[in-house]
Amino acid sequence: MDATLTHWINAAAGLHPVLDKAMTGASQIGVPLMVLAVVVQWWAKADRYHLRHAALSAGLAFLLGLAINQLVLLFVHRIRPYDAGVTHLLIAPSADWSFPSDHATASVAIVAAFAMQALPRRTLAFMIMAFLICWSRIYIGTHYVTDVIGGTTTGVLGAAVVRLAYRENSRLDNLVTKIL
């Protein structure tokens, strides 16, 4: 079922040049744009220190999620769907394993961190961006659907650990959020 759903999402790849460019662009610059959007939160005027805490939490969740992925990769070696003949690849092939998706981890960690800080409008905006990034990774042929689900899981896990370990208004938080 995973291969079937992945193939179905990737089926239009290579047939629609405008959609191909949009999905390739979302895949390549989506995460950097999300990171930039998080960084911009540092200079928000309203609720400044809460937003700074959320931005720091998102950054830590991003990094922790990717670290978790590296641990997973020690045990799980899944070939890419284009190597298995499931998808048509629109970008250069990747040299690493398919599971879990780092793009999904990074983007969803940001979404989860903002959601856990009770920032619904920002969460929704980041969620739309993350969905587009995750969908694009399947569309361009570089990931299976379950790779994206795995990345989503590690992103949420990273955000949850950060939420438990890095408390708002702690001495460290107060020190860091007052910078600049």
Image (spheres, rainbow, N blue to C red):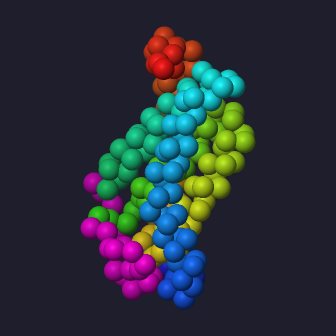
Q: Does residue 51 lie above or below 174 as drawn? A: below
User: Which residue is at a point 32% across and 74% down the rendered structure image?
Assistant: 93
Instruction: In this rendered view, identify the residue nearer to me: 59 or 70.
Output: 59
Whether residue 105 is visible? no
Q: Residue lying farthest right?
A: 121
* In the image, residue 82 lies in the stretch drawn in magenta: yes
* In the image, residue 68 lies in the stretch drawn in magenta: no
Instruction: In this rendered view, identify the residue nearer to me: 52 or 116.
Output: 52
Q: Does residue 6 lie above or below 40 as drawn? A: below
> Horizontal placement of 17 versus 78: left or right?
right
**Residue 164 image point, x, y percent:** 53, 27
Quadrant of the image containing the N terminus: bottom right
Predominant secondary structure, magenta span: loop
> Horizontal placement of 117 versus 29: left or right?
right
Q: What stretch is highlighted in magenta?
A: 74-95
**Residue 145 image point, x, y percent:** 52, 69
User: Which residue is at a point 47% across and 18% down the rendered structure image?
Assistant: 179
**Residue 118 image point, x, y percent:** 69, 33
Q: Residue lying farthest bottom?
A: 15
**Residue 55 image point, x, y percent:** 54, 33
User: Which residue is at a point 44% across and 84% down the rendered structure image?
Assistant: 88
